[in-house]
């Protein structure tokens, strides 16, 4: 085996008697500390947070080293979604006929507009972004950003902006997706 790896026999036997290197021993100790921090965090901490915790414990270590040891030990953070927004399909609002019928290819501008609301979490709280898109050229022609989901703050300002940006010259289909806006 020594000749295959081009290592002298004496070096091989010296290596056998030396045991683990200082770095290997440090890595084993560090991996145990990483496992402890990871366990306390309910398996949610990744290498940046684990590194911060180790530094708080006066362990001098870099984030790449922690990441490398976590990868070697097969320790990965479990990312949980903080929230889940679902559509209320049992609402008591009237449901209008689906005139668009999933025909999203439109040739004429200002004949089919679609709209949706998305939720954005910020430090100050939730914001709601409403956009209106013209299906003919896929351009956003109206939008509104609001801290409430009231129609007066979301859909109506976006609709007014869309009307300013596009003249409605013929019949228009306006398709809005998402939760009912109050």
Image: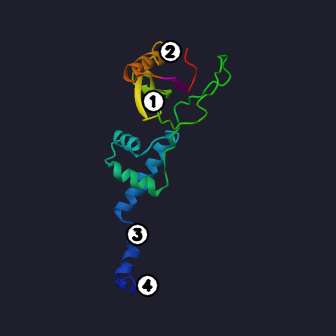
Which marked residue is nearer to the observer: mark 2 or mark 1?
Answer: 1
Looking at the image, which residue is at 34% across and 84% down? 8
Residue 175 is one of the magenta-drawn residues: yes
- Labels 4 and 3: the sequence-earlier one: 4
How dense is the environment of label 1, judged by Cα within 10 Å: few (below 14), some, or many (20 and up)?
many
CB atoms at circles 1 and 3 under 8 Å apart? no
Q: In whole angstroms, how far apart are the C-alphas of marks 2 and 1?
A: 17 Å
Nearest the viewer among 127 and 14 is 127
Query: Which residue shows up at 37% across the image and 71% down it?
Result: 18
Q: Select label 3 or label 2 by which is in front.
A: 2
Q: Which of marks 2 and 4 is in front?
A: 2
Does 98 lie within the magenta span? no
Q: Name the residue under label 4.
A: 1
Q: Which mark is residue 122?
A: none
Q: Which numbered disc, 1 or 3, marks the residue that appears first in the sequence?
A: 3
Report how far apart the C-alphas of labels 3 and 2 lie in the structure: 71 Å
Can the viewer see residue 14?
yes
Query: Does the rendering let one see residue 146?
Result: no
Q: How far apart are marks 2 and 4 (CA)?
A: 77 Å
* Picture coordinates of residue 22, whole percent (x, y): 34, 62
Q: Name the residue under label 1.
A: 133
Give the residue at mark 2.
151
Please name which of the two marks, 4 or 3, marks the residue nearer to the observer: 4
Between residue 153 and residue 57, name the one nearer to us: 153
Question: Vertical placement of 132 versus 19: above or below?
Answer: above
**Position of residue 142 measured from the top left corner of the image (x, y, whole percent):** 41, 24
Which residue lies under the disc numbered 3? Answer: 19
**Residue neighbourhood size for the residue with mark 3, other residues' Cα within 10 Å, grouped as few (<14), some (14–19), many (≥20):** few
Question: Which comes sooner in the sequence, label 2 or label 4?
Answer: 4
- Which span of residues is magenta-colored? 170-177
* Callout 2 crowding tier (Cα within 10 Å): few <14, some 14–19, many ≥20: some
């Amino acid at each position: 085996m020594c000749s295959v790896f081009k290592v002298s026999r004496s070096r091989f036997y010296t290596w056998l008697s030396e045991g683990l290197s200082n770095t290997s021993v440090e890595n084993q100790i560090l991996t145990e500390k990483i496992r402890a921090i990871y366990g306390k965090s309910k398996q949610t901490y990744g290498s940046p947070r684990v590194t911060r915790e180790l530094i708080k414990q006066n362990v001098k270590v870099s984030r790449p080293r922690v990441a490398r040891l976590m990868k070697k030990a097969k320790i990965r953070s479990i990312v949980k979604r903080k929230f889940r927004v679902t559509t209320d399909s049992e609402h008591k609002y009237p449901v209008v006929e689906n005139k668009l019928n999933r025909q999203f290819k439109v040739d004429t501008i200002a004949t089919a507009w679609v709209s949706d609301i998305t939720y954005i979490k910020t430090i100050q709280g939730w914001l709601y972004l409403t956009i209106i898109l013209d299906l003919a050229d896929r351009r956003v022609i109206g939008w509104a950003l609001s801290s409430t989901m009231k129609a007066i703050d979301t859909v109506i300002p976006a609709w007014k902006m869309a009307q300013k940006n596009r003249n409605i010259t013929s019949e228009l289909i306006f398709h809005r997706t998402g939760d009912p806006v109050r």
